[in-house]
Image (cartoon, grey):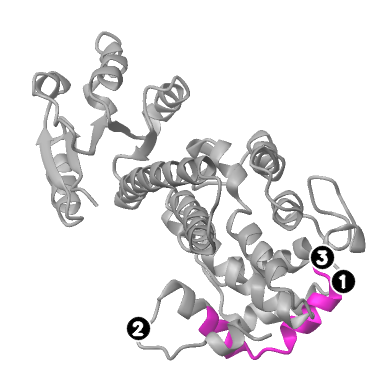
Amino acid sequence: MDEIKVWLIDNNLKRRESLFGRLSSLEVDVSPLESLAGWTNLPAVEGKPALALIALDVLNRKNIGLLGTIRKTRRPLSLILLADAKSADWAAALLDEGLADQVADADNWGSVYSAVKGEIARRELAKKNRIFVQKLRRLKSTQSENERRAAELEESYTATLENLMTALDLRDVETFGHSLTVAKYSRVLAQLIGIRETATLENIRKGALLHDIGKIAIPDSILKKPSRLSAAEWEKIKLHPVLGHGLIKEIKLVQEVGNIILYHHERYDGTGYPRGLKKEAIPVEARIFALADALDAITSHRPYRKERDFNAARREILENRGGQFDPKVVDAFATVKTEDWERIRFETTKILPGLESFSALYNRQ
């Protein structure tokens, strides 16, 4: 990947020096400046991927129009606004107007890290997607395709899905790796309840990877809010299954993928959303995924609560047999030892080094 040029524009010297040191550790080329004018007078970095972190403190009503000019004249460039609680609404408005790509908490390194890494990942994803589209166009223009080219296309497609969800996960460092983990859990659970068809298992894996794609349409101000959501904000969050299903319908993915995206928040007892489906009315792949999603959520850290261990997750899942979860899926889950679920998690996220391969369970046929 090309080295990323990062412009850090902040008139708060202490914060600028702190962020400069932290950003430098990410192996990017950082240039700190104290004013927007000082930056706009510098020549653009031709052909080099670039990010600009701009503290809202350096902006005012007179020079806010510069953001629009910058976006037009300094392409390709990602703009990340550094805001605080007092300027959060203004930052959100600028984001809605398309004058910035992301907003981060100026005094929260985790938030800044998430925004920078997310933009870097998004750029790399865009590059890979362009290569993918070029390959696809070449394939369509060729009348006779051999099996090797078809396999390459499938590999590129799968990699695109994984990179897309990695980029989305990086919008929040707290959920990084979530999509890959639940995809692994879902495939194992599907095999445990008797699904053997390779194509079906792969479709379940892809659906699990894409389950939260609808959140791409949810603003960061809601998605990354550290405090409790308001009723109105929660209603917006609950739209993401329908939004995601609408997105994948446009690219005509198979039914299992769409079912997981649309129904992954339905509950076996009928109290879920978006349609309040009950029992077998919920597609089996969505019932499988619901348990996989809960297992990862319970054992992962979130801003509003600490993670719990896998034994606690097992107890909660068993307690919700027939309520939140399909009894058949719970019974299948219970046949696997707690430490084996832990190993699947560690193997996927690489939390611990040196673990032996656990592919035997994952590839069980």
User: Magenta stretch?
Assistant: 325-344
Q: Which residue: 72% across, 64% down?
A: 290
Residue 169 percent across, percent down from the top left: 47, 54
**Tag 2, which secondary structure?**
loop
Asked if residue 10 lies in the magenta stretch, the reply is: no
Q: Are marks 2 and 1 in contact (CB under 8 Å)?
A: no
> Which numbered disc, 1 or 3, marks the residue that appears first in the sequence?
3
Query: What residue is pinned by disc 2?
Result: 353
Query: What residue is pinned by disc 3?
Result: 284
> Which numbered disc, 2 or 1, marks the residue that appears first in the sequence?
1
Q: Amino acid at mark 3?
A: Val
| Measured Cα–Cα span from mark 1 to mark 3 | 14 Å
Q: Which residue: 74% across, 49% down?
A: 262
| Measured Cα–Cα span from mark 2 to mark 1 | 37 Å
Q: Are marks 3 and 2 in contact (CB under 8 Å)?
A: no
> Is residue 316 visible in this depiction of the protein?
no
Q: Residues within 10 Å of mark 2 (few under 14, many from 20)?
A: few
